[in-house]
Image (tube, helix red, strand yellow):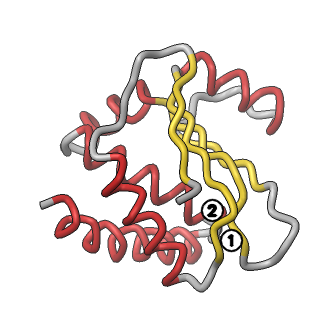
Amino acid sequence: MNIYYFSEEISFRLKQKRKISTWLQRVIWQERYTLNQLNFIFCSDHYLHGKNITYLGHDTLTDVITFNYATDAQTIFGDVYISIERVAENAKTYHQKMVEELYTVMVHGLLHLLDYKDKKAEDQLIMREKESFYLNQLRPILK
């Protein structure tokens, strides 16, 4: 499997990597895409804020940013940057476990690479439905 996990400016290790990778690969397969390479980079607010300014021109904190390098349609080749600090803060805000919020953000980032958008209200609804659908598939894998 060509799914990799890194950290920048923080000490973070994803638990159950093999199971999470299997789940992510299933999401890709169900969306009828082929996996080339998928990198998850867990980082600090500071690190991701810098990426947000440099590459997107947004001077705001965010929980996830994706970079799509695929040159072929229906192929996944990209980076998903996730601020662990934002994920922890959002978990408190949404009253859920940190790990649940992390999985939500991970699949959200992947959905962006699968060409789902979330700028318009109707796109946000589709994105939330997809997140929920795929998160429900993860629960049995983790048991």
Q: Where residue 89 sits: x, y (%)?
A: 34, 29
Q: Name above or below for residue 48 compared with residue 114.
A: above
Residue at image position (46%, 51%) is: 106
- Which residue is under mark 2? 112
Q: Where residue 5 sits: x, y (%)?
A: 51, 39
- Which residue is under mark 1? 115
Q: Are marks 2 and 1 in contact (CB under 8 Å)?
A: yes
Q: Nearer the viewer, residue 125 or 11?
A: 11
The answer to which quarter of the image holds residue 119 is: bottom right
The answer to which quarter of the image holds residue 34 is: bottom right
The local secondary structure at tag 2 comes to: helix
Q: CA distance from mark 2 to mark 1?
A: 5 Å
The local secondary structure at tag 1 comes to: loop
Residue at image position (62%, 53%) is: 38
Q: Name above or below for residue 69 compared with residue 29.
A: above
Q: Where residue 66 sits: x, y (%)?
A: 67, 48
Q: Nearer the viewer, residue 29 or 65?
A: 29
Q: Quadrant of the C terminus?
A: bottom left
Residue 97 placement, left or right of 116: left
